């Protein structure tokens, strides 16, 4: 525990997770409930994509009820749409931008000062940028990018970090005059290699707080500055992060985040009592001196003792999660509640869904025109800047094609000029002067 004794000597890094961002909410609530000094004493909170949203909620002090309700609202919206994320009414960036403008506290510029870091991917070269915020006036920030200090608005940086190309649109958003996309595409887990960073990810891998895999696979995929175990579990988690199944499935990921964070704390001796052993109805093993928690691995260089005997507990192993965390369970149940009105209940039923799909050929064209028209009207203020950017992009692409074609032609001409002359053709032979065989004479 000595590595967590000096405040400011560690940081937290949240990986991009899409709709599985509720996993981070469960982790944060467990740390806030069981080890609050880990959040109070952290020097910075880093995040990419949906992990950046959770990092902002932590530094802003937003409640677990608020985080669950806002994130689950998008999951329920996808569930209500007949085509899910492919429906023209699905506009995640516009929804998140409006939520940030409405819900961020007025003093967020003070709360995030020197504590918040967001991962961005510069378009089109794919260079990663970590944006660090410092207070510079009401609702404004000083942003340190590659040792350069500029000013910008925090919500727009978050929007850029959440923008997944083609999933959220076709034109990347701007931040301080430059185009940025999802930070997870270049650095999904900021400062993952730092020994002082507590890394969090909802995917199975070698992260500090993550689900423990039951797969026997030893293969890993190292991409986007993060490691993922190659397994069917991670495959389905990846699909769920982009296409959520149901609010109940996403809520279970939040509960699993709480359990995984609790396992992290117990293995490092940061909790007062072994809670997970009671969940699996087992007594914790005793060490040589009689204290609970055997199988210790002394991390001598870090001054930390790890107890690998702490069991891995899944959500299905907990019959009553409310006893473990009443506040989190109440927030999840409230967030999963559907519209109780009769028409909404009918639309969720089997006959209602069948009727929706039967009428889809008639309703979809009108819905497409309506929602696309709304997006076009909302896009009108940005049309000049976006058209100018697309013109520059096409110009640079044309120049690149021209340059490469010119180089290829010059190389080909050079090869032809330096190649040796072809040997002269031999004159045709006079067949009449050639000796013929005796049988043809």
Image (cartoon, rainbow, N blue to C red):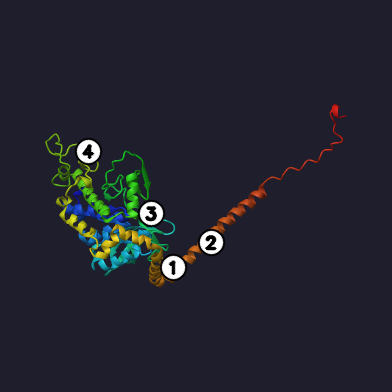
First in sequence: mark 4 vs mark 2: 4
Looking at the image, is mark 3 or mark 1 earlier in the sequence?
3
Q: CA distance from mark 1 to mark 2?
A: 18 Å
> What residue sits right under mark 2 in the picture?
398
Q: Is residue 288 left or right of residue 149?
A: left
Q: Residue at the far right: name it.
A: 441
Quarter of the image that includes the N terminus: top left
Q: Relative to 80, is 317 above or below? A: above
- Of residues 351 and 175, the one nearer the viewer is 351
Find residue 145 and report its image quarter: bottom left
In the rendering, which numbered label is found on residue 297? 4
Q: What residue would you read off at disc 3?
A: 185
Observer-nearest residue: 7 or 350?
350
Horizontally, is 188 left or right of 28 in the view?
right
**Residue appearing at x 20%, y 57% in the figure:** 333
The numbered mark at residue 386 is 1
Nearer the N terminus, badge 1 or badge 4?
A: 4
Cα separation between marks 4 and 2: 59 Å
In the rendered image, the residue lying farthest to the top is 438
Above or below — where is 65 with respect to 369? above
Image coordinates of residue 243 in percent, x first then y, are 34, 55
Indicate the position of residue 273 as horizontal and vertical percent values.
13, 45
Q: Examine the image and state in which quarter residue 304 appears.
A: top left
């Amino acid at each position: 525990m000595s590595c967590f004794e000096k405040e400011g000597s560690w940081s937290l890094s949240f990986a991009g997770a899409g709709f599985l961002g509720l996993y981070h909410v469960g982790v944060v609530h467990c740390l806030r409930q069981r080890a609050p000094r880990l959040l109070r004493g952290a020097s910075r909170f880093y995040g990419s994509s949906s992990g950046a949203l959770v990092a902002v909620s932590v530094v802003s002090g937003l409640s677990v009820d608020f985080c669950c309700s806002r994130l689950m609202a998008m999951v329920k919206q996808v569930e209500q749409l007949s085509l899910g994320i492919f429906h023209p009414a699905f506009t995640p960036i516009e929804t998140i931008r409006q939520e940030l403008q409405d819900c961020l506290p007025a003093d967020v510029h003070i709360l995030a000062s020197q504590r918040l870091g967001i991962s961005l991917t510069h378009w089109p070269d794919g260079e990663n940028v970590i944006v660090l915020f410092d207070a510079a006036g009401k609702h404004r920030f000083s942003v340190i990018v590659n040792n350069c200090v500029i000013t910008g608005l925090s919500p727009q940086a978050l929007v850029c970090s959440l923008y997944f190309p083609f999933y959220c649109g076709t034109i990347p958003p701007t931040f301080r005059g430059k185009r940025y996309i999802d930070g997870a595409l270049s650095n999904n887990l900021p400062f993952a290699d730092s020994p002082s960073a507590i890394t969090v990810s909802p995917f199975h891998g070698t992260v500090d707080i993550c689900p423990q895999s039951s797969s026997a696979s030893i293969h890993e995929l190292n991409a986007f500055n993060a490691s993922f175990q190659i397994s069917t579990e991670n495959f389905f988690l990846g699909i769920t992060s982009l296409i959520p199944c149901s609010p109940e499935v996403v809520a279970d990921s939040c509960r699993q985040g709480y359990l995984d964070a609790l396992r992290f704390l117990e293995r490092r001796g940061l909790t007062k009592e072994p809670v997970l052993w009671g969940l699996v109805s087992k007594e914790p093993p005793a060490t040589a001196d009689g204290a609970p928690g055997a199988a210790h691995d002394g991390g001598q260089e870090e001054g930390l003792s790890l107890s690998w005997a702490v069991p891995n507990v899944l959500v299905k192993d907990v019959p009553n999660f409310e006893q473990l965390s009443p506040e989190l369970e109440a927030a999840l149940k409230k967030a999963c509640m559907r519209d109780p009105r009769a028409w909404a209940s009918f639309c969720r039923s089997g006959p209602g869904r069948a009727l929706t799909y039967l009428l889809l050929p008639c309703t979809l064209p009108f819905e497409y025109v309506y929602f696309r028209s709304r997006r076009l009207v909302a896009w009108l203020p940005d049309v000049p800047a976006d058209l100018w950017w697309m013109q520059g992009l096409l110009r640079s692409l044309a120049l690149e094609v021209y340059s490469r074609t010119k180089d290829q032609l010059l190389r080909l001409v050079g090869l032809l000029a330096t190649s040796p002359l072809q040997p002269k053709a031999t004159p045709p032979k006079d067949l009449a002067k050639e000796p013929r065989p005796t049988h043809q004479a």
